[in-house]
Image: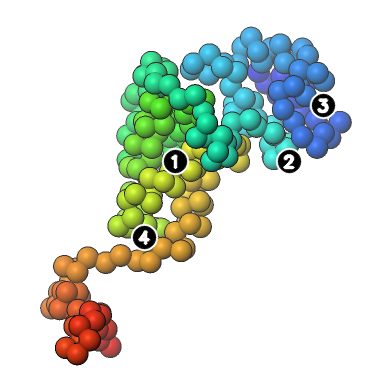
């Protein structure tokens, strides 16, 4: 049996039995030969079974039925037995060291694919309680999020909310279960949460083709002392 045969056999079995939920225990019970192959041959950088690789190859309908134990509630996240292991992080980074630029400036679809692979690997280690992995993935995601915020108008509301952005990045790391691409999940989460943020402008920003700065439109009521922003039309 090889990987391709294992995936085909698992997809065929799922199509036949149509379970409402799928997890490693279900596979072990209903497809022991396939499970043994996975257990022996499909491992990630730190030696755990790479279920993300397996699930990503299943039919879309079955991907949605995967009952992952990775996703954590806020209470579960806080209760984790946190530890530091740079070694686990380096196992991921060393394997993809020549592709880390993809978090800053991906050149093509292959770079974006590798960026997603690296992200998921670090997210899974962080979800186990590795503080080093959590710090590393959030640091890398800041580069990508920063680029998105400067590039996509629907994310520009995050500009000026650095602390809130870090909180949202950590929330996505904590909650990621298996919803396909982690980066797509992150983008959609930022887009949704950003709708409630007010745009922050620099008072030094130029207006009217550079003839004025925003601060020149800030006025103070001489009677009440209230400061407001005067908009000229």
Q: Earlier in the sequence, mark 3 or mark 4?
A: 3
Which numbered disc covers residue 156? 4
Instruction: Name the residue that disc number 1 marks.
Output: 170
Q: Position of residue 219 (x, y in %)?
A: 19, 82
Residue at x 53%, y 41% (from the top left corner): 74
Q: Position of residue 77 (x, y in %)?
A: 52, 34
Between marks 4 and 1 in the image, the one whose residue lies nearer the viewer: 1
Residue 150 higher or lower than 122, as above or below: below
Q: CA distance from mark 3 to mark 1?
A: 36 Å
Instruction: Name the residue that disc number 3 marks.
Output: 13
Mark 1 and mark 4 in contact (Cβ < 8 Å)? no
Between marks 3 and 1 in the image, the one whose residue lies nearer the viewer: 1
Mark 2 and mark 3 in contact (Cβ < 8 Å)? no
As rendered, which of 173 and 90 lies closer to the eye? 173
The image quarter containing residue 63 is: top right
Q: Residues within 10 Å of mark 2 (few under 14, many from 20)?
A: few
Residue found at the very far left of the displayed protein: 211
Mark 2 and mark 4 in contact (Cβ < 8 Å)? no
Q: Earlier in the sequence, mark 1 or mark 2?
A: 2
Specify whether 218 is left or right of 190. Answer: left
Q: Residues within 10 Å of mark 4 (few under 14, many from 20)?
A: many
């Amino acid at each position: 049996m090889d990987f391709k045969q294992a995936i085909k056999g698992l997809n065929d079995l799922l199509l036949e039995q149509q379970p409402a939920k799928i997890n490693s225990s279900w596979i072990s019970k209903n497809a022991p030969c396939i499970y043994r192959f996975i257990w022996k041959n499909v491992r990630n950088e730190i030696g755990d079974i790479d279920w993300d690789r397996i699930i990503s190859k299943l039919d879309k309908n079955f991907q949605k039925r995967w009952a992952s134990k990775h996703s954590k509630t806020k209470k579960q996240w806080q209760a984790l037995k946190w530890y530091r292991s740079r070694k686990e992080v380096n196992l991921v980074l060393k394997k993809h060291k020549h592709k880390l630029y993809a978090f800053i400036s991906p050149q093509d679809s292959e770079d974006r694919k590798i960026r997603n692979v690296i992200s998921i690997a670090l997210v899974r280690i962080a979800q186990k309680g590795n503080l080093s992995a959590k710090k590393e993935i959030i640091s890398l995601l800041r580069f990508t999020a920063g680029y998105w915020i400067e590039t996509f108008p629907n994310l520009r509301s995050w500009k000026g909310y650095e602390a809130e952005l870090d909180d949202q990045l950590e929330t996505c790391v904590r909650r990621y279960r298996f919803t396909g691409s982690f980066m797509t999940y992150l983008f959609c989460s930022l887009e949704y949460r950003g709708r409630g943020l007010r745009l922050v402008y620099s008072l030094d920003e130029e207006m009217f083709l550079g003839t004025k700065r925003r601060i020149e439109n800030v006025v103070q009521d001489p009677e009440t002392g209230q400061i407001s922003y005067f908009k000229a039309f």
